[in-house]
Image: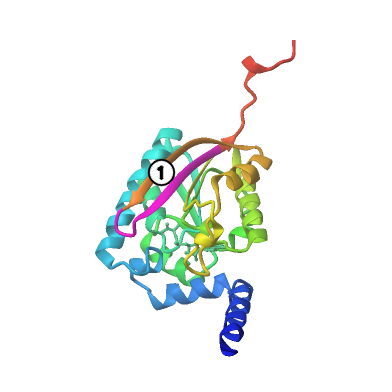
């Protein structure tokens, strides 16, 4: 009888300590090394190659259609792929005509991205401390912010992403949104509600201008594709005389 509460107490303590002991950088570096050459490195770890390829095709179609809806003349535009992983989608942006830079905090991922997408440029940098010294017409952050599990890093990541966006630029975020933070199945995932994204990015002057939801059939997950841009000062609604 006496052992049961003891184990429960210990398990609770472990659960509370786990997020503090978890290193996202170490997790991703190991994962990119262990699964090198497989889509499971950036896709769903429990799905096989074919299922991951099919899911990537669905994501690529939704994302590129959304980009075309909001950005004209891609061959005259620059694009930052923030949290680019091994460059699967980075290569799709190159094929659309964009001048592309990809960043990821995993050196192993960037090594693979350079082989996959020879016409993009890549840098190893964390989202929360991006420092490219320039801005872009388009920034994409695909399935990366849900992996920034530390709340302070998440705010810094949004701040530095915003700093790399042109005043007229468009930001595309694909994420798993959820009001229940406890819904996260593992330590490397932290979903947040849409309101939290809108509030934080709203603080940087960015407004949600489009939102699409779709399902990835193999993993049964719902994804939200969000589009933000700086609020325009519409002259017709200027209250000044
Ligand atoms: C699920 S993968 C998605 C990769 C890519 N965007 C795609 O859709 O193929 C998540 C990526 O985010 C990167 N990542 C996670 N946290 C990061 C951070 N704080 N800074 C930079 N990259 C990060 C990981 O290394 C990993 O490559």
On screen, 184 above or below 216? below
The picture places residue 230, in percent across and down from the top left corner, at 61, 35
Q: Dot 1 corresponds to which residue?
A: 213
Which residue is most to the right? 241
The picture places residue 7, in percent across and down from the top left corner, at 57, 85
Q: Is residue 15 visible?
A: yes
Q: What residue appears at the point 27 percent right and 61 percent down from the top-left corner?
A: 51
Stretch of the chain drawn in magenta: 217-228
Q: Is residue 135 visible?
A: no
On screen, 188 above or below 80? below
How has the structure been colored for display?
Answer: rainbow
Q: What residue appears at the point 62 percent right and 44 percent down from the top-left corner?
A: 201
The picture places residue 49, in percent across and down from the top left corner, at 28, 66
Q: Quadrant of the N terminus?
A: bottom right
Q: Quadrant of the C terminus?
A: top right
Q: What residue appears at the point 55 percent right and 58 percent down from the top-left corner?
A: 181
Q: What residue appears at the point 54 percent right and 55 percent down from the top-left corner?
A: 180
Q: Nearer the viewer, residue 193 or 81?
A: 193
How many neighbours does mark 1 have within 10 angstroms: few (below 14), some (14-19), or many (20 or more)?
few
Q: Nearer the viewer, residue 212 or 113?
A: 212
Assign the magenta stretch its main secondary structure.
Answer: strand
Which residue is most to the bottom? 2
On screen, 13 above or below 144? below
Q: Tell me: 185 left or right of 135.
A: left
Q: Nearer the viewer, residue 19 or 210?
A: 19
Which residue is most to the left? 50
Is 131 magenta? The answer is no
Q: Indicate the secondary structure of the residue bearing disc 1.
A: strand
Is 224 magenta? The answer is yes
Q: Nearer the viewer, residue 97 or 201?
A: 201
On screen, 108 above or below 64? below
- From the Cβ of disc 1, is ligand 1 less than 8 Å away? no
């Amino acid at each position: 009888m006496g052992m049961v509460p003891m184990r429960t107490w210990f398990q609770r303590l472990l659960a509370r300590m786990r997020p503090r002991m978890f290193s996202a950088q170490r997790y991703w570096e190991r994962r990119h090394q262990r699964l090198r050459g497989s889509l499971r490195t950036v896709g769903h770890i429990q799905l096989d190659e074919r299922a991951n390829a099919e899911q990537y095709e669905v994501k690529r179609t939704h994302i590129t259609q959304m980009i075309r809806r909001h950005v004209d003349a891609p061959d005259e535009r620059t694009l930052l792929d923030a949290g680019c992983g091994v460059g699967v989608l980075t290569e799709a942006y190159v094929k659309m005509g964009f001048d592309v830079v990809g960043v990821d905090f995993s050196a192993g991922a960037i090594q693979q991205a350079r082989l996959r997408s020879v016409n993009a440029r890549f840098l190893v940098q964390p989202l929360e401390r991006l420092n490219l010294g320039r801005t872009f017409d388009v920034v994409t952050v695909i399935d990366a912010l849900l992996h920034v599990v530390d709340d302070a890093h998440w705010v810094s990541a949004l701040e530095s992403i915003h700093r790399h966006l042109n005043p007229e630029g468009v930001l595309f975020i694909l994420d798993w949104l959820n009001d229940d933070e406890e819904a996260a199945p593992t330590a490397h995932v932290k979903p947040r509600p849409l309101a939290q994204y809108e509030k934080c990015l709203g603080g940087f002057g960015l407004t949600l201008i489009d939102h699409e939801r779709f399902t990835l059939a193999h993993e049964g997950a719902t994804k939200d594709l969000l589009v933000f841009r700086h609020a325009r000062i519409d002259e017709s609604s200027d209250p000044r005389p």
